[in-house]
Image (tube, grey):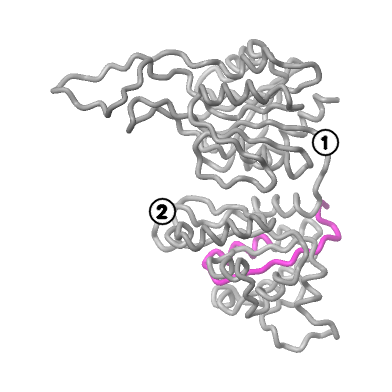
Amino acid sequence: MPLEGKNVVLGVTGGIAAYKACELTSRLRKAGAQVHVIMTKNACQFVAPLTFETLSNHPVVTDTFVRPDTWEVEHIALAKCADVFVIAPATANILAKMAHGIADDMLSTTVLATRASILLAPAMNTGMWDNVATRENVETLKKRGVRFIGPEGGYLACGDTGSGRMSEPAQIFEAIDALASPRQDLKGLRVLVTAGPTREMLDPVRYITNRSSGKMGYAIAEEARQRGAEVTLVSGPTVLPVPEGVERMDILSTQDLYDAMTARCAHADVVIQAAAPADFTPARVSDRKIKKQGDGNLVVEMKQTPDVAAVVGQLKRPGQILVGFAAETDDVTKNAQGKLKKKNLDMIVANDVTAPGAGFDVDTNIVTFLTKDGMETLPCMPKRRVAEALLDRVMKLRG
């Protein structure tokens, strides 16, 4: 079992997503972990402590001043025993306490005392998540090495739609597993990853882009860094936070991506091109906003952009591994095989963006890995799991 013998301290705060922490506790127990649950007073209004006691097979801690069954100071004991400290859901309140060192209940006291890896799964109203105070607290915690998963976008319990929904228990479990049992098989390698869309300017106001969110590339960068690699992330415009320890270079257009990659690709041991650059860009960019002209239509002449992947393939050096992506809508395998050879790739990751669970701006993907020796299709899984599988195969290609 992957987490056999590991101690996970699970903090549960007062949000409607507290019910999801029950499934997370069950998953952790089935994987062999010892789960110690700390609940805030407000969390007990959503889920009874007895539920977590039954699922974890351990007493649930809810009060700083209840006499413990042993002589140990309980919050210190839990802080010391933790291999991973998780808070799911993590409300705006606990984020603020952690960012400012406030310790006024059992959970905030224990997390302040721990030296374990900390993982937070935020869950709150969209307005609260977007509030400048919360954003500053998140950035402060990230700078201290605290890791985050989510929040996701979607329909929230309050009726709003937007970011703020807690990540699913399966995704949080995978993140805990990675923190508790980190692999370092990429240590010493330099990995260059591209992610996100490009923007091709039409005039000072408008641009042409695509629906790429960058989530796949960011997941790859985060997984590679966690496994010990020195990671550079060349990113188009996204709203995603920079993974801890990853150097990010922001680009805007396909030409910017071309310039960045030709300058950096020779220094990388592994190059993974998950970005979605535009194939065409306006032949002329107006220096003023284009106005409507009567009832006539606007005709925009387009020209081809540089083929970044093909140029990187031409610059490939001995021993270097190149991985490309092929987001297709038809003849997926055929198109991907053509790109594999044409662009001098070692592997290409193909997906049908029209398939449910594999399109743009979702948290899962369905991919096929193609190499000169064959192909392998994976089931629908979280993008972090896809990233893990991709890097596993990269290491096999390296021999």
Task: Tell me if residue 255 comes above or below residue 364 in the rendering.
Answer: above
> Residue 242, located in which quarter of the rendered image?
top right
Question: How far across and how far down the image is residue 106, in percent?
Answer: 68, 78
Task: Tell me if residue 125 comes above or below residue 50 in the rendering.
Answer: above
Task: Tell me if residue 246 comes above or below residue 285 in the rendering.
Answer: below
Q: Given the image, on which type of amino acid does mark 2 rest?
A: Thr
How crowded is the residue under tag 2: few (<14 C-alpha within 10 Å), some, or many (20+)?
A: some
Image quadrant holding the C terminus, namely top right
**Residue at the image point whose x is 70% and y is 66% from the top:** 10
> Does 331 lie within the magenta span?
no
**Residue at the image point whose x is 55% and y is 35% from the top:** 250
Where disc 1 sits, the SS reads: loop
> Residue 139, located in which quarter of the rendered image?
bottom right
**What residue would you read off at disc 2?**
161
How crowded is the residue under tag 1: few (<14 C-alpha within 10 Å), some, or many (20+)?
A: few
Direction from residue 288 to residue 185 in the image, left or right: right
Question: How far across and how far down the image is residue 195, in percent?
Answer: 58, 33
- Which residue ends up furthest to the front in the rendered image? 287
Question: Between 30 and 209, which is closer to the camera in this rendering?
Answer: 209
> Does 21 lie within the magenta span?
yes
Question: Between 260 and 64, which is closer to the camera in this rendering?
Answer: 260
> Residue 191, located in which quarter of the rendered image?
top right
Give the residues drawn in magenta, as a range.
1-24
**Residue at the image point whose x is 57% and y is 58% from the top:** 138
CB contact under 8 Å: marks 1 and 2: no
Question: Between 257 and 370, which is closer to the camera in this rendering?
Answer: 257
Q: Given the image, on which type of amino acid does mark 1 rest?
A: Gly
**What residue would you read off at disc 1?**
188
Task: Tell me if residue 221 comes above or below residue 322 in the rendering.
Answer: below
Mark positioned earlier in the residue sequence (1 or 2): 2
Question: How far across and how far down the image is residue 38, in percent?
Answer: 68, 73
The answer for how far apart the CA atoms under marks 1 and 2 are is 43 Å
